[in-house]
């Protein structure tokens, strides 16, 4: 066992820190307020090879291990959780299933530009009536000659408005329940795919979210991802990977809250001394740092298992639920430490508190994570 | 097609130096980093390489544990690195560093141009570059803010107190560069991963031709104390005159400014 980062990992962390400090920190407040997609930062990340981190070099990636990948997501999220999620969603939810389940042609055609960051990916599974209950989806895919015809509405599609490539889930046979769900790769140029309503969110506002409307959307048979009926397995596998990223994102958000709290409490003077001299503040900071360390170990362990090709579903769920819940708890404390100033727009902790909440909701709610963990333990 | 050697120093990162009530510097948590201007030196070498071809090698003298620095240097573009190391090479006197570099550069390399940072982030003695050039008996240009090559001639702009001085010299030569010369690129992910696979030529003390037993011993490092007067001045004419007088009497601004 080794808890120490390698020299290579340390350099990677220093480089991503420098990159986000230079390009993301200066705009983080503005892109949150205006809900703007930071295309210029994504271009920088693409140029540095940060958009296809865990995929092999022959598919346009960098061939990075998952522990390091998650560490990078934490570092980006520490500056801007929305951008951290844009990268994480693009990498693990959209590119991941193509790498894990796609055939060679699909990888060359879709994964290579995604991993190089020339294309952005989105993952469309959620529907108005089907959140955690993926099987309640109503989008259908009917085989007609050499293509499937998809009809339905997807909602809360992260990266939807900016994506070039969508991984979309639809029932090829609704009568089979979960076993009738299939996955498809669809280009944004497909005339049957339209970006619907954009959502303006409470947090991670620079991450773009929309409906995706599929109306007689013809998808060539060769763009079926995996086999017919493999959709649920593909979705669950993608979430397993994605949850490591969300746990890392939550840790990044909370680390930023801790950074802000330490710096503010040391300079804020009340009753003639910095508030950091008060035990009430010290305990909040100590608890925050302890939970951050625990959550970081949890996501690193889940990522380590993935790198070792061991099962990691339970561990990814544990990392995600623990990191997400400690993140909402401690970002709220960080606002408390900042008092009235923490409640003002433009203060980082105000944004962090809003950003943290989503980590308890997407890629499986905290309740869904507990279902996964208990399901694994009580089998 | 210049063969370029870029020198760098792996120094304590001042951002991690802790200060408390004790007079000594707490270096326990201090990580190390590439000396700031040496990043500019490597970047300058890479830009010349991209424009004129040739090759770039990095070279450093340091402690055997400083392997991260070698990877850092290589992730910035050089195709190979010379890592001269010994446990005693931690606090070398600049003249010794220059002598060790000269020894290795002469014995193991072929070069047209050597580029150093103007000074190191820790000591900023500005000694190693000029001393190395002297030992190699090649021309040296300091304070360089722009470089161009024209055949065998090198044209460098120097930023000096009263303006920009343009000099031309023939290769081989040594330059020390200012941070103004470029904005060092941040290594991409693939650059860092590729760095571990590049060749590193390790040179230990026994392979050097001279006796380089360090002649400098660091007994302790103390914090610099900045005394503040806490004197408040208004924007009244009398106070402005007092401010100028004070600054002049302390030699902070030149006389005759008034």
Image (cartoon, coloured by chain):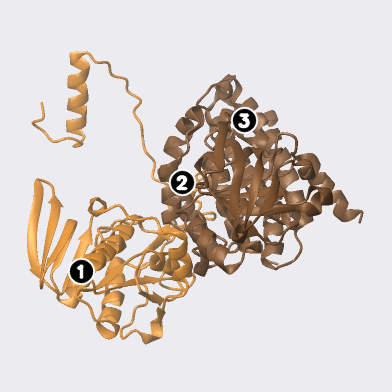
Label 3 sits on a secondary structure element that is: helix
What percent of the width, then of the height, locates residue A98? 61, 59
Q: Residue at x 13, y 73 (%)?
A: B171
Identify the chain of the residue marked 2, using the numbered disc in the image: A
Q: Circle 2 sits on which residue? A: A20
Output the letter for the chain in brown.
A
Q: Earlier in the sequence, mark 3 or mark 2?
A: 2
Q: Quadrant of the N terminus of chain B?
A: bottom left
Q: Depth check: A378 or A348 in front? A: A378
> Is disc 3 in contact with disc 1, using a CB cutoff of under 8 Å?
no
Q: Circle 1 sits on which residue? A: B52
- Image quadrant of residue A46? bottom left
How many numbered markers are drawn? 3
Residue A147 visible in rendering: yes
Q: Residue furthest toward the top?
A: B236
Label 2 sits on a secondary structure element that is: helix
Q: Depth check: B202 or A106 in front? A: A106
Identify the chain of the residue marked 1, using the numbered disc in the image: B
Category of crowding for the residue at label 3, using alpha-carbon neighbours closer than 10 angstroms: few (below 14), some (14–19), many (at least 20): some
Output the letter for the chain in orange.
B
């Amino acid at each position: 066992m080794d808890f120490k980062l390698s020299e290579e990992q340390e350099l990677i962390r220093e480089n991503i820190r420098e990159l986000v400090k230079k390009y993301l920190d200066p705009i983080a407040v503005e892109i949150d307020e205006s809900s703007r997609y930071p295309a210029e930062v994504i271009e920088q990340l693409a140029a540095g090879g940060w958009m296809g981190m865990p995929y092999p070099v022959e598919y346009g990636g960098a061939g990075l291990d998952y522990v390091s990948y998650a560490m990078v997501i934490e570092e980006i999220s520490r500056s801007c959780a929305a951008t951290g999620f844009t990268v994480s969603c693009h990498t693990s939810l959209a590119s991941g299933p193509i790498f894990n389940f796609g055939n060679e042609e699909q990888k060359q055609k879709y994964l290579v530009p995604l991993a190089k960051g020339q294309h952005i990916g989105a993952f469309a599974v959620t529907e108005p009536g089907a959140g955690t209950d993926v099987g309640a989806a109503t989008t259908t895919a009917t085989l007609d000659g050499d293509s499937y015809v998809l009809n339905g509405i997807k909602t809360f599609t992260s990266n939807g408005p900016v994506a070039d490539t969508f991984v979309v889930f639809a029932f090829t046979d609704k009568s089979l329940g979960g076993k009738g769900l299939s996955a498809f790769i669809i280009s944004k140029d497909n005339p049957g795919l339209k970006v619907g309503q954009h959502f303006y969110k409470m947090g991670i506002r620079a991450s773009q979210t929309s409906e995706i409307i599929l109306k007689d959307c013809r998808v060539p048979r060769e763009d079926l991802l995996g086999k017919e009926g493999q959709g649920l397995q593909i979705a669950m596998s993608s979430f397993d990977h994605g949850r490591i990223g969300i746990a890392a994102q939550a840790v990044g958000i909370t680390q930023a809250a801790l950074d802000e709290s330490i710096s503010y409490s040391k300079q804020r003077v009340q009753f003639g001394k910095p508030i950091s001299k008060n035990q009430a503040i010290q305990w909040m900071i100590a608890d925050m740092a302890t939970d951050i360390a625990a959550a970081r170990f949890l996501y690193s362990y889940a990522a380590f298992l993935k790198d070792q090709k061991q099962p990691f579903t339970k561990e990814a769920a544990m990392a995600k639920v623990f990191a997400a819940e400690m993140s909402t708890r401690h970002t709220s404390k960080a606002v408390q430490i900042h008092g009235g100033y923490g409640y003002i727009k433009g203060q980082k902790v105000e944004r962090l508190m809003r950003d943290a909440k989503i980590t308890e909701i997407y890629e499986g709610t905290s309740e869904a994570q507990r279902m996964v963990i208990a399901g694994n333990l009580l089998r | 097609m210049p063969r370029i050697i870029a020198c760098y120093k792996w120094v304590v990162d001042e951002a991690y130096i802790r200060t408390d009530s004790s007079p000594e510097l707490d270096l326990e948590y201090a990580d190390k980093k590439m000396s700031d201007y040496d990043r500019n030196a490597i970047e300058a070498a890479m830009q010349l390489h991209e424009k004129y071809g040739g090759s770039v090698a990095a070279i450093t003298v340091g402690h055997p544990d400083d392997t991260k620095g070698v990877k850092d240097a290589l992730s910035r573009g050089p195709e190979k690195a010379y890592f001269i190391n010994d446990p005693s090479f931690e606090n070398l006197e600049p003249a010794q560093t220059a002598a060790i570099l000269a020894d290795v550069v002469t014995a193991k390399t072929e070069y047209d141009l050597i580029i150093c940072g103007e000074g190191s982030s820790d000591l900023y003695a500005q000694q190693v570059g000029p001393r190395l050039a002297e030992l190699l008996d090649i021309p040296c240009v300091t304070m360089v803010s722009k470089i161009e090559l024209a055949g065998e001639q090198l044209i460098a702009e120097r930023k000096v107190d009263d303006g920009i001085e343009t000099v031309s010299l023939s290769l081989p030569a040594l330059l020390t560069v200012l941070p103004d010369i470029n904005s060092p690129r941040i290594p991409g992910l693939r650059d860092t991963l590729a760095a571990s696979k590049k060749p590193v030529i390790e040179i230990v003390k026994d392979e050097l031709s001279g006796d380089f037993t360090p002649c400098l011993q660091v007994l302790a490092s103390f914090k610099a104390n900045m005394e503040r007067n806490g004197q408040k001045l208004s924007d009244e004419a009398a106070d402005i005159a007092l401010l100028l007088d004070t600054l002049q009497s302390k030699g902070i601004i030149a006389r005759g400014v008034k």
